[in-house]
Image (spheres, rainbow, N blue to C red):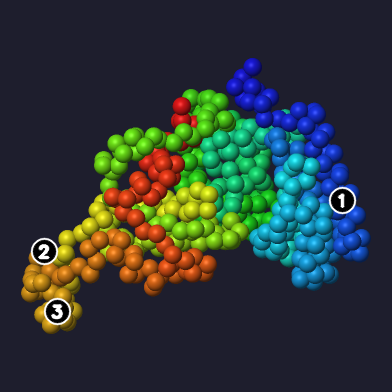
C-alpha cells in the first residue's frame, strides 16, 4: 500500500460515518422545513460544500443554503434567513457580506446561509450566490477516484497550515483545493505542478479571463470568469504551499498530513535563545468581541502600522508576528536595536540642485535641532540633527494616537501593555515566545 493510500484510509469517512452524516443532513432539512419562517416563505434548501460534493474528510461541516427568490428584498432575505437558522440550530450570528448562522447540529458544525436562487452565476446579487454553482461544477467534474484525490489534497493543506480562505489564514479554500486537483488530474500531479509555481501564476480550467489580476496566485473561477478564486491567498501562504509541495515530493511522509503536536520551548531554552536574538518589543491587549474576519483584518493592519512606524524612524524591524492566546493578543516585533543614538545624519539635495540646496542650508542653519552646520559629503548637503525618539517604546507611546490601527482597535490605544527586552519573558507566555522564536514548518516538528 502506498503512503497516499494509507493516508486515505485514515481520512476518508467510513460507511458508518457517511450514514451518520447523511442522517444529520436529513434531520437538519426537516428541522428547517418545520420553522415558521420556512413555512411562510418560498425557499429552496440547497446543500453545498464538501458534503454535497463528496470531498469531505471526517467530522465535516454542514453547509446548508436557504435560496430565496430574487424578488425578495435584501433586508427581508437576511432577516428571515437568520431567524430560520436560529430557530433550527441556535448558534450565533456571523457576518460575511451579509449575516448567517453558525452553530452545531447532531455533533457537526453547521452554517445556515441565506442566498438568492439564480439561473447562472453571472446573475449573482451577493457574493455567496455563486456557491451552489461551485458545488454543481465539482460534482460534474469529479468521480469517486477524483474525490479521494481531493481528500488527500485537503488533508495535506490542513497538515501544512495553508488551508482556509479566512483572513486569519489567507490560504486555500475548499473549492480552490478541489479545482487544483481536478485541473492537474491527481494529488501527486497537482503537487508536481505546484512545486513549479511562480508568483502571479495564472491557472484556468476551460477559458482564460479578460480580467486583469495582480494577486499572488490567479485561478480563474470556471463558473464566473471575472473572479479569481485564489484572491485570498497571501504571498507567504502561497510560498509555504509551493515549498511544502516540493518537500513532499522529495521526501514524502505522514507528517505532512498529520504533523506532530507542537511542544513549547522550555523556559530555559527561551532564556538561552533570547540573548542571541535582536531586540524585541511586545504590544499586548485584550481581544475585543468582534467576529474573526473583522478582528484579524484590523489586527493585521495594527501589526503593519507598528512595523512601518518603527521602520520610518530607523529602528529597522527584522520580523513581526501576532498571536492570540485566550483573550490576550500579543504583537511581537524584533528589530536591530530598540535604542538609537541621540544624533543622526539628515541628507539633503545634491549640491548642484541650487534652489533646493539653498533652502536646505538656510532651513537647517536656523533650526534649533541642528547639531552641526550643513556640510557636503558624497555630493550632497548633509546636517547632523537630534533624533526625536531614541527608544522604540517611547516612539510607540507618543505616536500611536495619530495612527489608524482599525476602527475597533483604535478604541484600545489607551489600554495597550508595552514591554521591551528586559520584561518580555515575564510578561509574554512561553507558548507565544516559542512560536515566535521557533520557525520550523509543521511537518518538521519531531
Residue to which mark 3 is pinned: 368
Image location of residue 269, percent across then percent down: 34, 34
Image quarter hosting the N terminus: top right
Residue 288's place in the image compared with 89, above or below, is below
Is 27 in front, or is 425? 425
Image location of residue 63, percent across then percent down: 75, 49
Q: Tell me if mark 2 has few (under 14), some (14-19) or many (20+) residues whose alpha carbon lies within 10 angstroms of its own.
A: few
Is 131 in front, or is 24? 24
Residue at point 79% right, 57% down? 85
Residue to which mark 2 is pinned: 378
Q: Tell me if mark 1 has few (under 14), some (14-19) or many (20+) residues whose alpha carbon lies within 10 angstroms of its own.
A: some
Residue 13's place in the image compared with 119, above or below, is above
Point out the tag, 3 or 1, that comes first from the N-terminus.
1
Residue at point 82% right, 51% down? 46
Note whether residue 193 is visible: no
Q: Nearer the viewer, mark 2 or mark 1?
A: 1
Q: Tell me if mark 3 has few (under 14), some (14-19) or many (20+) residues whose alpha carbon lies within 10 angstroms of its own.
A: few
Residue at point 7% right, 74% down? 373
Point out the tag, 2 or 1, that comes first from the N-terminus.
1
Helix, strand or loop at label 3? It is loop
Note whether residue 8 is visible: yes
Is 68 in front, or is 139? 68
Q: Nearer the viewer, mark 2 or mark 3?
A: 3
Image location of residue 193, percent across then percent down: 54, 36
Is 72 in front, or is 276? 276
Helix, strand or loop at label 2? It is loop
Image location of residue 189, percent across then percent down: 59, 32
- Label 3 to label 1, Cα distance in Å? 76 Å
- Label 2 to label 1, Cα distance in Å? 78 Å
Q: Are marks 2 and 1 in contact (CB under 8 Å)?
A: no
Helix, strand or loop at label 1? It is helix
Task: Give residue 31's mark.
Answer: 1
Amino acid at each position: 500500500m502506498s503512503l497516499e493510500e494509507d493516508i486515505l484510509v485514515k481520512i476518508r469517512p467510513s460507511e458508518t460515518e457517511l450514514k451518520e452524516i447523511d442522517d444529520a443532513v436529513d434531520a437538519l432539512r426537516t428541522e428547517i422545513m418545520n420553522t415558521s419562517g420556512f413555512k411562510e416563505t418560498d425557499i429552496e434548501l440547497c446543500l453545498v460544500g464538501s458534503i454535497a460534493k463528496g470531498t469531505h474528510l471526517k467530522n465535516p461541516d454542514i453547509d446548508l443554503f436557504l435560496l430565496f427568490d430574487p424578488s425578495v428584498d435584501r433586508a427581508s432575505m437576511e432577516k428571515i434567513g437568520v431567524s430560520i437558522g436560529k430557530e433550527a440550530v441556535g448558534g450565533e450570528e456571523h457576518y460575511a457580506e451579509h449575516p448567517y448562522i453558525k452553530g452545531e447540529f447532531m455533533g457537526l458544525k453547521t452554517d445556515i446561509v441565506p442566498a438568492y436562487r439564480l439561473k447562472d452565476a453571472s446573475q449573482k446579487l451577493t457574493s455567496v450566490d455563486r456557491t451552489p454553482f461551485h458545488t454543481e461544477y465539482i460534482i460534474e467534474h469529479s468521480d469517486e477516484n477524483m474525490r479521494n484525490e481531493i481528500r488527500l489534497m485537503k488533508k495535506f493543506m490542513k497538515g501544512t497550515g495553508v488551508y482556509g480562505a479566512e483572513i486569519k489564514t489567507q490560504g486555500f479554500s475548499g473549492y480552490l483545493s478541489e479545482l487544483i486537483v481536478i485541473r492537474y488530474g491527481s494529488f501527486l500531479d497537482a503537487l508536481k505542478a505546484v512545486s513549479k509555481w511562480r508568483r502571479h501564476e495564472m491557472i484556468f480550467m476551460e477559458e482564460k479571463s479578460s480580467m486583469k489580476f495582480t494577486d499572488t496566485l490567479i485561478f480563474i473561477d470556471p463558473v464566473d470568469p471575472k473572479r479569481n478564486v485564489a484572491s485570498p491567498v497571501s504571498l507567504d501562504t502561497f510560498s509555504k504551499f509551493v515549498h511544502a509541495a516540493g518537500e513532499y515530493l522529495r521526501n514524502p511522509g505522514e507528517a505532512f498530513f498529520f504533523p506532530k503536536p507542537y511542544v513549547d520551548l522550555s523556559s530555559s531554552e527561551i532564556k538561552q535563545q533570547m540573548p542571541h536574538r535582536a531586540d524585541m518589543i511586545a504590544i499586548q491587549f485584550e481581544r475585543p468581541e468582534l467576529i474573526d474576519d473583522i478582528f484579524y483584518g484590523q489586527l493585521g493592519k495594527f501589526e503593519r502600522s507598528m512595523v512601518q512606524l518603527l521602520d520610518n524612524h530607523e529602528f529597522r524591524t527584522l520580523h513581526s508576528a501576532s498571536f492570540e492566546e485566550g483573550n490576550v493578543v500579543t504583537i511581537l516585533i524584533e528589530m536591530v536595536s530598540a535604542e538609537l543614538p541621540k544624533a543622526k545624519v539628515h541628507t539633503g539635495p545634491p549640491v548642484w540642485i541650487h534652489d533646493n540646496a539653498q533652502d536646505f542650508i538656510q532651513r537647517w542653519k536656523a533650526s534649533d535641532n541642528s547639531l552641526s552646520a550643513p556640510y557636503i559629503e558624497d555630493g550632497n548637503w548633509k546636517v547632523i540633527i537630534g533624533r526625536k525618539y531614541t527608544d522604540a517604546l517611547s516612539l510607540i507611546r507618543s505616536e500611536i494616537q495619530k495612527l489608524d490601527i482599525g476602527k475597533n482597535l483604535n478604541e484600545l490605544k489607551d489600554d495597550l501593555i508595552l514591554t521591551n527586552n528586559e520584561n518580555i519573558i515575564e510578561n509574554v507566555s512561553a507558548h507565544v515566545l516559542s512560536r515566535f522564536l521557533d520557525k520550523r514548518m509543521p511537518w518538521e516538528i519531531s
